[in-house]
Image (spheres, helix red, strand yellow):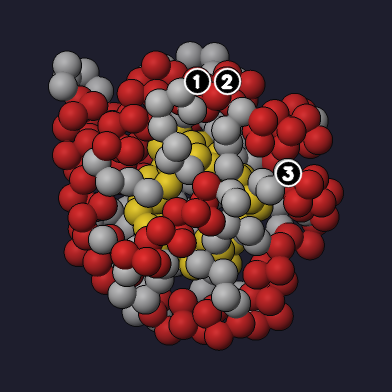
Amino acid sequence: MNRIDKKFRELRKKKQKALVAFFTAGDFGLSTTKKLVLEFDKRGVDIIELGVPFSDPVADGQVIQASSERALKRGTKLKDIIKLVKGLRNSTEIPVILMGYYNPVLKYGLKKFVSDCSGNGVDGVIIPDLPPDEAEDLVAEAKKRDFATIFLLSPTSTPDRIRLVSKGSKGFIYYVSLTGITGARANLPKELASRVRLIKRYSDKPVCVGFGVSRPGQVREIARVADGVIVGSAIVKEIEKDSKRKDFIIRVGDYVQKLAEASH
């Protein structure tokens, strides 16, 4: 069984919800990425989403765009991120998902990408610019290797779209809480709870909510209706803010721990 499925099974038994932490791989160096993953695991994060830096991240706001630029300036490559995850498997079994755009995957080679990811400890992938209706090849390759393909739904998704995304998704369904790009927001959308309930009427897959989440109170509110909460830009911002401090791994860990406690 895939580590993501195992994690949701474990959380259901404990009656807890998942905290999924996103940050960009290679931001301030891959050695920093490794330290953050291990710290987040220790602090109660359930699933790690590592962003694959890309020069044209159309779904991302300024904070994540800037982290991608920093990682690219350091020469971060997809193959190095996969190699990093392989090394992490000596120390942790936390589920790791890569989140990135389709161009780097195509350049790497689709079959090789799925094979190298699953063979080196990566548990799944989220590709925001690859809709399920165009992802048959990816889904077919992933099924051969128990590799999770996670697709996105949004506030404008129709019931037909929910069925399609549910069919193609493995691991969980990513519900984008708002129409727009990534980035922390002061308030959650009013229709969020009703939209998650609608998705659950059409799918038995876990539903995790991301985009716009930054505070423990928001995590607690989402965890009442969803199976997991995804926090990205706010974590990337904390990493950037404290990056020059010697104790910044611990300081970011303190922030993430509060989010994890709110989801549990």
**Could you say where residue 255 lies in the image, as x and y percent from the top left?**
19, 43
**Could you say where residue 257 lies in the image, as x and y percent from the top left?**
21, 45
Spatial separation of the CA atoms under disc 3 and disc 2: 18 Å
State left or right for residue 137 relative to residue 213.
right
Element on which disc 2 rests: helix
Q: Please tell me whether mark 1 or mark 2 is closer to you in this view.
A: 1
Give, as a three-letter code, the residue at label 3.
Arg
Q: Please tell me whether mark 3 or mark 2 is closer to you in this view.
A: 3
Which of pointers 3 and 1 lies earlier in the amino acid sequence?
Answer: 1
Relative vertical location of residue 81 with respect to residue 58 in this rendering, above or below: above
The residue carrying mark 1 is: 87
Q: Residue at x 71, y 69 (%)?
A: 167
Asked whether residue 73 appears in the rendered view, the answer is: no
- Label 2 near label 1: C-beta < 8 Å? yes
Spatial separation of the CA atoms under disc 3 and disc 1: 20 Å
Relative vertical location of residue 178 with respect to residue 256 in this rendering, above or below: below
Element on which disc 3 rests: loop
Which of pointers 3 and 2 lies earlier in the amino acid sequence?
Answer: 2
The residue carrying mark 3 is: 145
> How many C-alpha atoms fall within 10 Å of the one at disc 2: few (<14), some, or many (≥20)?
some
Mark drawn on residue 83 = 2
The quarter of the displayed image where residue 153 is located: bottom right
> How many C-alpha atoms fall within 10 Å of the one at disc 3: few (<14), some, or many (≥20)?
some
